[in-house]
Image: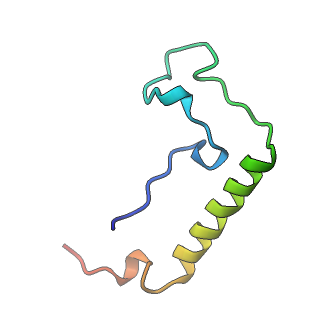
Amino acid sequence: QGTPHMLGGDELSRTQQGNNNAYCQDNENSWFDWRLDKRKQDFLAFCQHVIALRKSSVLLNSAFLPDD
């Protein structure tokens, strides 16, 4: 339950080797690999599908939720 959370690069399986604070490292942990192998293409397509589903569904749209 809750809102899915994706950071930039998650849709391309960017892991930063588990380091959630790699911004100050100039090594393979923070470098972005833009190559899309079959696994990354499939995961990107899944993310695109889930985002489209959330946008198109009244029940999953934030406009459906009551204000606090």
Q: Is residue 6 above or below residue 57?
A: above
- Residue 64 in percent (x, y) is at 36, 83
Residue at the far left in the pictured view = 68
Tally of numbered tags: 0
Q: Is residue 68 left or right of residue 52?
A: left
Residue at the far top in the pictured view = 26
- Residue 44 in percent (x, y) is at 69, 55
Residue found at x 59% / y 23%? 30
Question: Residue 8 sits in which quadrant?
Answer: top right
Q: Is residue 59 left or right of residue 9?
A: left
Residue found at x 65% / y 63%? 46
The answer to which of 15 and 24 lies nearer the viewer is 15
Question: Residue 1 sits in which quadrant?
Answer: bottom left
- Residue 37 in percent (x, y) is at 81, 43
User: Which quadrant does the C terminus fall into?
Assistant: bottom left
Residue found at x 56% / y 82%? 56
- Residue 60 in percent (x, y) is at 44, 78
